[in-house]
Amino acid sequence: MITRRAGCHAPYGLGTLTGRAFFPRLIAAPFHHGLVIVFATATALSVLAAIASLLRGPRAPAPVALREPGQASPPRSLRAPVRRRNGTPHPARPGAVTNPAPRGEPPPDVNPERGSTMTDPAQSSEGEGTALVVMDYQPGILGRLKDADGLVARAAQAISVCRRHGATIAYVRVAFADADYEAIPSSNRMAALVAGAGAAFHADSPTTAIDERIAPAPGDLVVRKTRVGAFSTTDLDRQLRQRGVRRLILAGVSTSGCLLSTVRDAADRDYELYVLSDASADPDPEVHAFLTERIFPRQATVVTVDELAALFAAP
């Protein structure tokens, strides 16, 4: 049985809910009635919301993208950015790609023709980056060959072609100063050969000068060596690289001496190599043929002087 207390005009349940049953002096009747109205309104709104939810039906689940078995999830740079509570996205991490180029297309700052920056260098001459290296064309060595005049004529033709196309011309001669004779150790078999030649290989001897028919022109490189190859006792490699040379055309006497040593050394120095077979010679024709046909093609392209012009015209 529900009873009423003094000063309380509402049932016991509402008086308890509004607090008037416990504090009748603090909670006046008008305030008590106002709270009753608020609670009643809230209850009614809750009932209406429940009814609307029932009428709308269950909410459809959000679609989920399915991946094939083994397919990796998309990279973070392609996912939607995480946003702050105020709706602005978080800043990207330093170095993160926020707008990658479509697959198969280069980034905006890349030239697709070059694969690097957009800026192309000025058009260069056909022979830029190329050097013709003429080795040991000196009277003391040419005199050992049967067809020295024909060899020099073909070398002169090669020099003319390379010079016309803007290639570097480099000359190498073998000659010894007084101190060089003493510096060759007895363990090197070259010491006995040089000593036996006497003054024929001295740096001041006319026999060690470059043949006057193919004399160097101003701007050509000229180095003197004291070993067989063109690089080991000279600064030829440094001078070539200072000029941006990456491709060498080699002609020398003899094929089994300076040419063989220089082909091997230049290949180890990562030059692109060409050998002029008919502007090189050896006292033994069979050795020349074996080297130019069987050995040199492993590290160089063997061509003739007549094929030289086409080499510059090639793309």
Image (cartoon, rainbow, N blue to C red):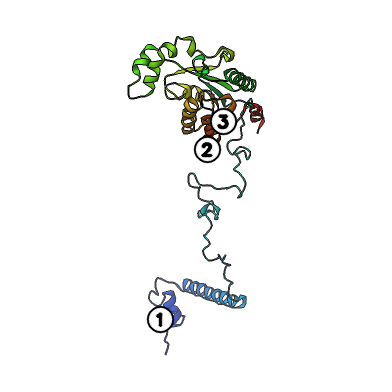
Graded by Cα atoms within 10 Å as few (under 14), some (14 to 19) or many (20 or more), the crowding at tag 1 reads few
* Residue toward you, 310 or 173: 173
Q: Which dot, 2 or 1, sits closer to the camera?
A: 2
Secondary structure, mark 2, is helix
For marks 2 and 1 on the same chain, the one whose residue lies earlier in the sequence: 1
* Residue toward you, 87 or 293: 293
In which quadrant is the N terminus drawn?
bottom left
Give the residue at mark 3.
274
User: Looking at the rendering, which quadrant does residue 80 occupy?
Assistant: bottom right
Q: Position of residue 301 (x, y in %)?
A: 57, 34
The vertical placement of 74 against 172, above or below, is below
Amino acid carrying mark 3 in the image: Tyr
Q: Position of residue 52 (x, y in %)?
A: 60, 75
Q: Which mark is residue 6?
A: 1
Secondary structure, mark 3, is strand
Graded by Cα atoms within 10 Å as few (under 14), some (14 to 19) or many (20 or more), the crowding at tag 3 reads many
Q: CA distance from mark 3 to mark 1?
A: 121 Å
Amino acid carrying mark 1 in the image: Ala
In which quadrant is the C terminus drawn?
top right
For marks 3 and 1 on the same chain, the one whose residue lies earlier in the sequence: 1
Q: Position of residue 162 (x, y in %)?
A: 62, 22
Q: CA distance from mark 2 to mark 3?
A: 11 Å
Q: Are marks 3 and 1 in contact (CB under 8 Å)?
A: no
* Residue toward you, 99 or 39: 99
* Residue toward you, 249 or 246: 249
Q: Measuring 63% from the left and 38% from the top, which residue is drawn there?
A: 113
Amino acid carrying mark 2 in the image: Arg
Q: Which mark is residue 298?
A: 2
Q: Measuring 46% from the left and 28% from the top, which residue is drawn there?
A: 261
Q: Which dot, 3 or 1, sits closer to the camera?
A: 3
